Amino acid sequence: MSISKKLVLNLRFVILSMVGYCLLSNVVSAQTDPALVAPMEENITLWTMFLQGGWAMYPLLLFSIATVGLAGYCGFLIREKRFIQPEASEDLRTAIMNGEVEAGLSACSAHDGYMTEILSVAFETIQEGHHSVTAVNEAMEERAGKVLAGPMVFVQYLQVVASVSPMMGLLGTVSGMVKAFRNIASQGLGKPELLANNISEALITTATGLLIAIPALMAYFYFKNKYMAASSGIYERLGEFTRLMTKHRMLNEDRSSAE
């Protein structure tokens, strides 16, 4: 068992011990003091829980906002229509079949997206006088590495949030337990109600970190799989257009492949 796992288990044991002590002390006090038999009702809201969580709730709030924002932005970026632009197929096929490089560049500019941005470099390479299939494929691979890296960056940020949120919650737990032990050192164990806020801080921050990390991790895997599927669709369409260019003499096959 690693040191971090041992630390988490020890913290959980300490927290559960403190909670059990507080509950037991409250039961004993209620039996000895009639005034405590009927406890006062307290309205617990999200705001009161946020305040009980202490300072760690503020960065956790930022992480929750970042999770929602990143998920929405990834949903906007990673769309099949934005990746392959099916509406541009007819214009691109017409330009390739007629051997018109300028028409192909115009079609790519008219239909903004990842696939057309990558394919435009193929027309630019042909326009520069390079009619080799290998040269065009190399140019498109270089452009694809740059274009397709953009959406994946924001997907990776979701993984960062999912990893950091539980750690921030654990840091809040440590902070709450440190305050609890300080109260024990200064006030003793005779007043368990003094430890209630510190234990609440420890438990709330841990739960909040997990509540943020779980949806962020689910969103990360969802958008990652969607990105991989959409990227595969782009390469399939690029191969289709490259073969069409070769068929209509816009590109020349390499000697090694022709032999």
Image: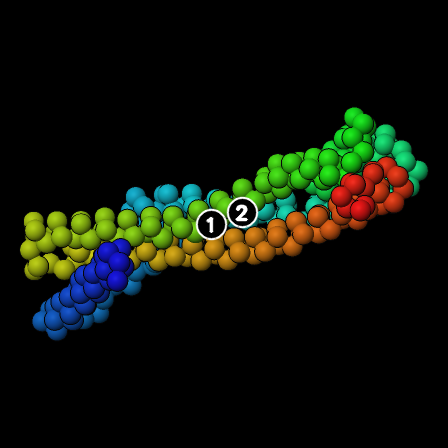
Amino acid at pointer 2 = Val
Residue 37 at x, y = what percent?
18, 71
- Residue at position x 90%, y 36% in the image: 99
Disc 1, SS: helix
Label 2 neighbour load within 10 Å: few <14, some 14-19, many 20+: many
Residue 238 at x, y = what percent?
75, 45
Left or right position of 164 against 178? right
Label 1 neighbour load within 10 Å: few <14, some 14-19, many 20+: some
* Foreground pick, 129 / 71: 129
Taking the image as drawn, is residue 166 in sight?
yes
> Residue extending furthest top?
128
* Foreground pick, 42 / 89: 89
Q: In this rendering, is residue 25 above or below 104? A: below
Left or right position of 30 against 203? left
Confirm or deny contact between disc 1 and disc 2 (CB under 8 A): yes
- Residue at position x 43%, y 51% in the image: 162
Q: Quadrant of residue 120?
A: top right
Disc 2, SS: helix
Residue 217 at x, y = what percent?
47, 55
Taking the image as drawn, is residue 88 in sight?
no
Left or right position of 32 against 166? left
| Quadrant for the N terminus in the image | bottom left
- Residue at position x 15%, y 70% in the image: 24
* Foreground pick, 133 / 42: 133
Residue bearing mark 2: 155
Residue 111 at x, y = what percent?
78, 38
Amino acid at pointer 1 = Gln
Left or right position of 42 against 150? left
Residue bearing mark 1: 159
- Residue at position x 41%, y 57% in the image: 211
